[in-house]
Image (cartoon, helix red, strand yellow):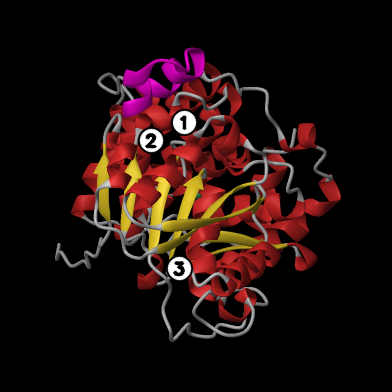
Amino acid sequence: MSLAFSYYMPTRILFGVGRLKELAAVPLPGRKALVVIGAAGAMRENGYLDRVAEYLRRNGAESVVYDKILSNPVSEHVDEGAALARENGCDFIVGLGGGSTIDSAKSIAVMAKNPGEYWDYIVGGSGGGKVPVNGALPIVAVPTTAGTGTEADPWTVITKSATREKIGWGTDATFPVLSLVDPELMLSVPQEVTAGTGMDAFFHAVEAYLATVSQPASDHLALEAIGLIARYLPLAVRDGSNLEARTKLAWASTGAGICESLSCCISHHSLEHAVSAYYPRISHGAGLTMLSVSYFSWLAERHPERFPDMAAAMGEDLYALEEERDKAFGFIIALKKLIRNIGLHEEKLSAYGVKREDLRAIAENSFYTMGSLYKLTPVPMTVDEVTAILERAYS
Ligand SMILES: [Zn+2]
């Protein structure tokens, strides 16, 4: 078998407990930051915004705050945040919070330097597919959840509400130049968010391992992240103050983010984006989890090759199994255990108010908006098959 791959991972990552304070001393990419935070208020309540502003000040940088980002972030806020950055002469963008705020920071960084509207540049769905020739302002990421891995990849996922399109997009310019991953900031994450974001990181690793563009470095990191999350996510959900578990999960999330840079997610993510574009109340991690048993059972049946490695990484004992199919389904058994151990076992699409008559439209939407990931999925899929996967996840 021949081996060929591309490796590009340009982000400086400062990882470790207590390292946020290094923002006061590390070389910054500019003198005036737009700090992007969520609308829910946690960054103010936890004192994280004050700390970041103070560290930036000590490091010689002013800051302006944009605080409207929703948990499923929308393109209107990208355009508004970019206008604020331009009006204030900001020369770099800081994303502080969960994946939605850091993703928005990336998109704002692009629109602060390029004309038109954000959706003009999106590839997929009704996006204009234009190239942002001016690049982006430098991006600094400070994640406060262990989930998206956006601190270590170029991807940003934004929704255009009017047309129900939730599309991931990115360029080399949307890799953060600097990410401070401080597990101490994650101690305050509530139980349900810990579970959902942890499962998001888990599926980034799983999908990167299964994608047709996987490579040796992403394979190593994916199995590492899968094993760490299977072991430590239930501990962090049970006891959010467990700093060891928070630290392992922060590394798993960042490692899985690197996987998203070196390999890629597959159509499980296309499908979830369509679900939460229709039902924005469903968080990304919860949506992925609800779809996962149905989706990966379908895939393991048709393409069992890489599933046993993941089952073994999760601690499943495959020793007595002889059939390849049984070994592959060891992963499904381990997945169900993990979901049960973090308290999400009864989640079904129907419980979130999803209408059965929308399932086919959701399947079609996933091809329209995020069809590119179907091309990286190891088995071709049709709209009928995807609708059937949704049906099985429904009730
Ligand atoms: Zn994700």
Asked whether the beta carbons under mark 3 and mark 1 sit within 8 Å of each other, the answer is: no
Q: Residue 147 placed where, x, y %?
A: 46, 40
Bounds of the magenta span?
Answer: 232-247
Helix, strand or loop at mark 3:
loop
In the drawing, what numbered circle is on residue 328? 2
Asked whether the beta carbons under mark 1 and mark 2 sit within 8 Å of each other, the answer is: yes
Residue kind at label 3, given as amino acid type: Gly
Predominant secondary structure in magenta? helix
| Residue for point 57% across, 22% down | 191
Q: In this view, does 335 lie above or below 174?
A: above
Q: Which residue is identified by label 3?
A: 170
Q: Residue 110 placed where, x, y %?
A: 49, 73
Asked whether the beta carbons under mark 3 and mark 2 sit within 8 Å of each other, the answer is: no
Residue kind at label 2, given as amino acid type: Ala
Q: In the orientation shown, which residue stands out farthest toward the top? A: 239
Residue kind at label 1, given as amino acid type: Ile
Return the disc, 3 or 1, that comes first in the chain's sequence: 3
Seen from the viewer's position, the closer of residues 303 and 185 is 185
In the drawing, what numbered circle is on residue 373? none
Q: Distance between the residues labelled 3 and 2?
A: 33 Å
Which of the two marks, 1 or 2, is nearer to us in this view?
Answer: 1
Instruction: Estimate how packed mark 3 is, as few (under 14), some (14 to 19) or many (20 or more) residues with alpha carbons within 10 Å.
Output: some
Helix, strand or loop at mark 2:
helix
